Amino acid sequence: MIFSPPQLPASIRLYRLVIVTTENIIWFTPLQVIRTFGSLQITDKRVLRLLKEKEKGDGLLASEAKRVLGILDSAAVVAASA
């Protein structure tokens, strides 16, 4: 993360803050979408395909996709037994 020393002009500090925020949005938004699929227990075949595709990668998105797939699988087992 980039921290701006207080002696820099406010416009440069703001610019650096915008850059850091924009970089974080790139991975943060897909992460929140994946978490939403798990929270809402969406088991549409397109969603499951997307999660399995993300799970093949590495990093935070892959681990989150794996976790959500586990949640959706356990929810499907509970729904099938009811």
Image (cartoon, grey):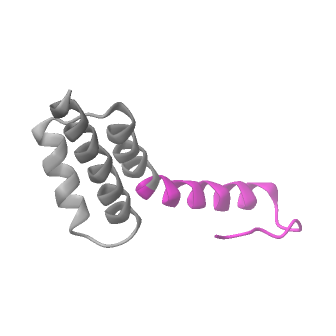
Q: Residue at x 27, y 38 (%)?
A: 75
Please give the range of residues in magenta: 1-27
Q: Quadrant of residue 14?
A: bottom right
Q: Nearer the viewer, residue 73 or 19?
A: 73
Q: Nearer the viewer, residue 2 or 40?
A: 40
The quadrant of the rendering that contains the N terminus is bottom right
Q: Can residue 24 be found in the magenta stretch?
A: yes
Q: Residue 33 appears at what percent x and percent y?
A: 36, 42
Q: Residue at x 19, y 36 (%)?
A: 43
For residue 14, side relative to residue 30 (left or right): right
For residue 73, side relative to residue 22 (left or right): left
By secondary structure, the bulk of the magenta-drawn segment is best described as helix
The quadrant of the rendering that contains the C terminus is top left
Q: In the displayed orientation, state which residue is furthest to the top.
A: 82
Q: Nearer the viewer, residue 77 or 62?
A: 77
Number of numbered discs visible in the structure rendering: 0
Q: Residue 66 appears at what percent x and percent y?
A: 30, 59
Q: Quadrant of residue 58?
A: bottom left
Q: Can residue 77 be found in the magenta stretch?
A: no
Q: Residue at x 32, y 39 (%)?
A: 37
